[in-house]
Image (cartoon, rainbow, N blue to C red):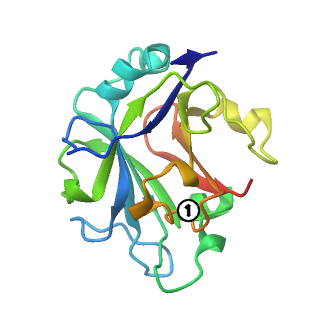
Amino acid sequence: MKKNGYVNFNFLDSKPNINNILVGLDLDYSNKVIAPDGHELALIAFMPIENLLTIAPQFKTDFQNKEYKDKVIYVFSYYDKEDYFLDYITEIDDAIQGYTKVIIGDKNQFKFNLDKFYPINPIENLDEMSFLGGQPEYLQQESYDFLEKYIFIGQILGMDLPEKVNEIFYLTENIGYIFINRDLSGGLFFVQTT
């Protein structure tokens, strides 16, 4: 299950619960997060920090002396079923400008439909491209200084996603990267093409 601090995963097709790390797509959640152009962002991931530390204990040093009880990493992304949206999610500048957003908040800050999400399933396949922890793979044009500013949470390959949500990165060949600020004040999410 672990290689150099990595925890590989795939997805379960089972009923999720509010304590699972979840990935999916919900456009009807409460307390909408809005992009600079007025577009409502989609909630695509829900990651309770306590569950993250259980699955990937290597994060414990990153969260040492930080208040994370009942805190969740929410990941929001630009998504449009009818129109091309890849240009809004592939650059770090897009994330900084707010076309994607990572919010660390309370477990009930956003109400959403659990049935639209899939729990992750830690596995022992070292060849998986979706994993938590370690270092990002295939990350393009990002300096070491960039990586020092954030805690790398994980990456998800679009083709590893369940079929009902496998277009949240526009193309299934794309990889989504999740980072959080070291002070837990937010983070970055962006997609790159492989």
- Residue drawn at x 33%, y 38% is 21
Residue 47 vs 97, above or below: the answer is above
Query: Would you identify the image quadrant in which residue 173 lies?
Result: bottom right
Identify the element where label 1 is drawn: loop
Disc 1 marks a residue whose amino acid type is Phe
Q: How many dots with numbers?
A: 1
Residue 125: which quarter of the image? top right
**In this view, 157 is above or below 4:** below
Q: Is residue 99 left or right of residue 140?
A: left
Q: What residue is shown with label 1? A: 169
Is residue 160 found left or right of 15 in the rendered image? right
Mark 1: few, some, or many residues within 10 Å (few <14, many ≥20)?
many
Q: Is residue 116 above or below residue 71?
A: below
Q: Residue at x 20, y 59 (%)?
A: 113
Q: Position of residue 47 (x, y in %)?
A: 35, 39
178 or 169: nearer the eye?
A: 169
Closest to the observer, 181 or 46: 46
Residue 66, by quadrant, is: top left
- Locate residue 189, reporting x and y percent: 54, 51
Q: Identify the residue at horizontal 52%, vertical 37% (top origin).
A: 181
Residue, x 61% and y 65% (percent of image)?
171
Residue 125 in the image: above or below residue 24: above
Q: Residue 17 at x, y = what percent?
A: 19, 41
Front residue of 88/13: it is: 13
